[in-house]
Image (tube, rainbow, N blue to C red):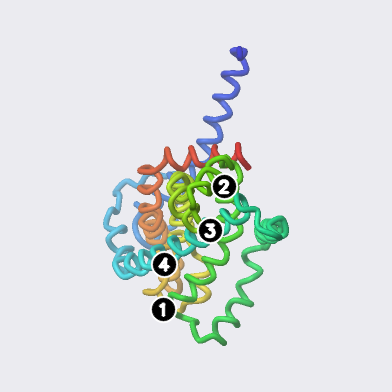
Amino acid sequence: MTIARSELWGGRALLIGLMTITILPFISIFMTALHPSGTVPGGLDWPSDPQWGNFVEAFKVAEMPALLASSTFIVLAVVPISLAISTMAGFAIGHLRIPGSRMLLFLFVFGLTLPFGGIIVPLYYLERDMGIYNTRLAIVLPLIGLYMPFAVFWMRAHFVNMPTEISEAARVDGATTWGLFWRIHLPLARAPMLSLGILMAVWTWNQFLIALVLVEDPTQRTMAGALGAFQGHYATDVPLLCAGTILIVLPTLVLFILFQRQMISALLQGSVKG
């Protein structure tokens, strides 16, 4: 396919514009974090005397070591359980075509339309009655449920495109339904599972609202919940708040840089198979 030169340069200009709009807020936050504590910078002004110590102060104020441990625990609890449930559900709906699979898929897709902020208040009262309010379970259980619609839809898109001849050949060799899933289809689903796991890990790490509303103890929240530590007298300290934001975002950026190929290929794969 031949692309006109004007169209090519127009596309590049559009991409550069979009990239600039995306990166500009991060540059502004970084520059603001280097200003003296207690000041209100303009946003894109480079300070005459960069205050690199703001990052150290933000690290201490937000109790980052405890939050790192807490966030790691929550990610390790949420992602494997969500992956296991969504993979089995996607296999049952997409490949086995169990009775009622269309209705189940509709219900999961309907779950994607629920407004996230609208369930916070019911969750608060439900968890308080269950006695898990202000514990890490208050974050883990809702996140597993909230991820299910997207995760099941994602895994179903993989299994629905798997050739039925593979399953028929395994059945002839005497494979049970569990053996078919565990020995045949699970190894073939490593790529979409890895991509989905990375996405859910990033979402869990950056989870802010649930961690802030359902857990009062700051050391039991996620990394993003550390921003709550800047409430009160730190709320007006914009440079310190920006330094804390960068520290919170940093692990996510490292994870994206390490696995960017898998994430992009998985997103493209999902858009084709949908």
Q: Nearer the viewer, mark 2 or mark 1?
A: 2
Q: Nearer the viewer, residue 57 or 191?
A: 191
Q: How many marks?
A: 4
Q: Is residue 266 above or below residue 174?
A: above
Q: Nearer the viewer, mark 4 or mark 3?
A: 3
Q: Position of residue 148 (x, y in %)?
A: 57, 61
| Helix, strand or loop under label 4 | helix
Mark number for residue 217? 1
Q: Give the CA separation, mark 2 to mark 3.
A: 10 Å
| Helix, strand or loop under label 2 | helix
Q: Is residue 155 above or below residue 232?
A: above
Dot 2 amino acid type: Phe
* Quarter location, residue 4: top right
Dot 1 amino acid type: Asp
Q: Is residue 215 above or below residue 223?
A: below
Q: Position of residue 236 (x, y in %)?
A: 45, 66
Dot 3 amino acid type: Met
Q: Give the CA separation, mark 4 to mark 3.
A: 18 Å
Residue at (54, 85) in percent of width and height: 130
